[in-house]
Image: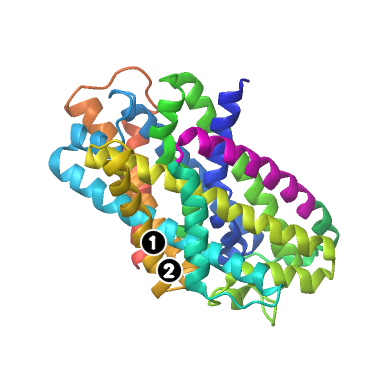
C-alpha cells in the first residue's frame, strides 16, 4: 500500500471521522446502542453506494470535472441547477456546523486561560487559520490531514481505552431502536465523504481501481470507529441529568458539553485532556476536507482556476457565507448537521443514482467501472433516499 493510497484513505476518514462524529452519541442517545448500531451500518451501506456511483459517473468524464459537470452531462440543465443548489446548501451547512463547533472548541480552550472569547471572533480565527491550508492546495491539505489524522487516531484510541473502565453495560442494554429514526439525518451526515471523490480522482491520476479500494476501506474504518465511540459514550454517560446526553440535544455548546460531561463522570484528568484534543482535531479535519471539496466544486462551476482573481472568487464564495451564518446563528452545530443529512441524501444518494441511470440507460455514455447490481441497486437507492426524506419531513 503506497503513500498516496494511505493519504487518500486518510482524507476519506478525515472527512467522515470529524465534527459529525462528535454529534453521534448525542443525537442517537434516545435510540440506545442497538438502534444506533443498526442506523450506522445502514447509513454506511447507502452512502458508500452513493460514493461509488459518483466515482463511476465521474470516470466517464475527463479529470477535473466535478458534480456540476457530471449533472450537466447526464441530466441536462435542470440537473445542473439542482446540483448547484443542493451542493451549496449541503457544504455551506456542513461548513457552518464545523465552524460553529470550531468556535465552540476555541471558546472552551481559551476560557481555561481566563479569557472569554466571543463566538464571532472564535469563528473568524478558526476560518482564517484552516482556510489558509485549503488555499495552499490539495497536497497541503493531504499532508496537514495526515498529521492531524495520525494524531486524532492515536488520541481516539487512548480516549477509548481510558474510558472503557467507566462503561456500564446496563446503560448499553437499553434498546429503543425506533427512536434512532429521529437521528438518521445526523448519522447520514457522518458519511458525507463522497463530496471529495472527484478531487481524489485527480489526485490518483485516474486510477479507478485504486480509488475504489480507497473508498471502500476508507469508509469502513469510520464505521468501526463510530460503533466503538457510540458504545463508549452511551455506556458512560446517562441520558438525563445535569451531564446527561438528552439535554445536550438543545445545548448551544454540545461539543464542549460532551467533553465536560466525560470529565465530570470519570473525574480523570487524562480523559479530560484526551477529550479536548480529540474534539479539536475532529473539527479541524472535517473543515479542511469539506472546504477542499467545496472549493473544487466552485472552481468547476465557475469554470475558473483557483489562482488570482478566480481564486479570490472561489475562496470568498466558499468561506464568507458559512462565517456569516455562524456569526448570526452560533447554535448552528446540531441543527446544521440535521439539515445537512437531508442534503446529503439528495446530493450523494439520489443525484448519483439518477445520473448513473441516465448515463447508462438513456444516453449510453457509460464506460469502464460500474457499481454492481445494475438497475436493482439504483432503484433501491432511489427508494431508500426518498424514504429517508419522507421520514424526516414527516
Q: Residue at x 57, y 33 (%)?
A: 9
The number of callouts visible is: 2
Image quarter of residue 117? bottom right
Whether residue 251 is situated above or below residue 277 in the rendered picture = below
Q: Residue at x 43, y 43 (%)?
A: 135
Q: Residue at x 30, y 44 (%)?
A: 298
User: Separation of disc 1 and disc 2 at Cα?
Assistant: 6 Å
Image quarter of residue 324? bottom left
Relative image position of residue 98 (x, y in whole percent)? 50, 59
Q: What range of the chain is rendered magenta?
A: 136-160
Whether residue 312 is situated above or below residue 174 in the rendered picture = above
Q: State the mark number for residue 322.
A: 1
Mark 2, residue position: 326
Q: Residues within 10 Å of mark 2 (few under 14, many from 20)?
A: many
Relative image position of residue 125 (x, y in whole percent)? 51, 62
Q: Residues within 10 Å of mark 1 (few under 14, many from 20)?
A: many
Provide the secondary structure element on which disc 1 rests.
helix
Label 1 close to label 2 by CB (< 8 Å): yes
Provide the secondary structure element on which disc 2 rests.
helix
Relative image position of residue 150 (x, y in whole percent)? 68, 40
Amino acid at each position: 500500500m503506497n503513500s498516496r493510497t494511505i493519504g487518500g484513505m486518510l482524507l476519506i476518514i478525515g472527512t467522515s471521522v470529524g465534527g459529525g462524529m462528535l454529534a453521534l452519541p448525542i443525537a442517537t442517545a434516545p435510540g440506545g446502542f442497538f438502534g444506533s448500531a443498526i442506523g450506522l451500518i445502514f447509513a454506511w451501506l447507502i452512502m458508500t453506494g452513493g460514493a461509488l456511483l459518483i466515482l463511476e459517473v465521474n470516470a466517464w468524464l475527463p479529470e477535473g470535472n466535478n458534480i456540476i459537470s457530471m449533472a450537466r452531462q447526464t441530466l441536462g440543465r435542470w440537473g445542473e441547477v439542482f446540483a448547484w443548489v443542493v451542493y451549496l446548501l449541503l457544504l455551506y451547512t456542513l461548513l457552518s456546523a464545523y465552524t460553529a463547533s470550531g468556535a465552540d472548541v476555541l471558546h472552551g480552550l481559551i476560557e481555561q486561560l481566563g479569557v472569554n472569547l466571543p463566538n464571532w471572533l472564535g469563528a473568524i480565527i478558526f476560518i482564517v487559520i484552516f482556510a489558509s491550508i485549503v488555499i495552499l492546495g490539495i497536497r497541503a491539505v493531504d499532508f496537514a490531514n495526515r498529521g492531524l489524522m495520525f494524531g486524532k487516531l492515536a488520541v481516539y484510541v487512548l480516549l477509548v481505552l481510558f474510558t472503557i473502565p467507566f462503561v456500564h453495560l446496563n446503560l448499553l442494554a437499553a434498546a429503543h431502536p425506533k427512536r434512532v429514526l429521529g437521528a438518521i439525518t445526523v448519522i447520514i451526515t457522518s458519511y458525507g465523504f463522497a463530496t471529495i471523490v472527484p478531487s481524489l480522482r485527480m489526485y490518483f491520476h485516474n486510477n479507478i481501481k485504486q480509488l475504489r479500494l480507497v473508498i471502500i476501506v476508507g469508509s469502513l474504518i469510520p464505521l468501526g470507529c463510530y460503533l466503538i465511540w457510540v458504545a463508549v459514550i452511551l455506556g458512560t454517560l446517562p441520558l438525563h441529568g445535569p451531564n446527561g446526553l438528552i439535554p445536550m440535544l438543545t445545548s448551544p455548546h454540545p461539543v464542549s458539553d460532551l467533553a465536560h460531561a466525560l470529565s465530570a463522570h470519570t473525574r480523570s484528568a487524562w480523559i479530560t485532556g484526551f477529550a479536548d484534543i480529540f474534539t479539536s482535531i475532529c473539527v479541524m479535519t472535517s473543515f479542511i476536507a469539506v472546504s477542499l471539496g467545496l472549493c473544487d466544486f466552485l472552481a468547476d462551476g465557475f469554470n475558473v482556476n483557483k489562482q488570482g482573481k478566480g481564486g479570490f472568487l472561489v475562496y470568498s464564495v466558499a468561506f464568507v457565507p458559512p462565517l456569516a451564518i455562524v456569526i448570526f446563528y452560533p447554535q448552528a452545530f446540531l441543527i446544521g448537521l440535521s439539515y445537512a443529512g437531508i442534503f446529503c441524501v439528495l446530493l450523494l444518494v439520489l443525484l448519483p443514482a439518477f445520473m448513473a441511470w441516465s448515463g447508462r440507460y438513456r444516453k449510453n455514455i457509460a464506460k469502464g467501472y460500474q457499481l454492481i447490481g445494475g438497475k436493482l441497486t439504483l432503484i433501491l437507492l432511489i427508494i431508500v433516499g426518498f424514504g429517508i426524506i419522507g421520514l424526516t419531513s414527516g
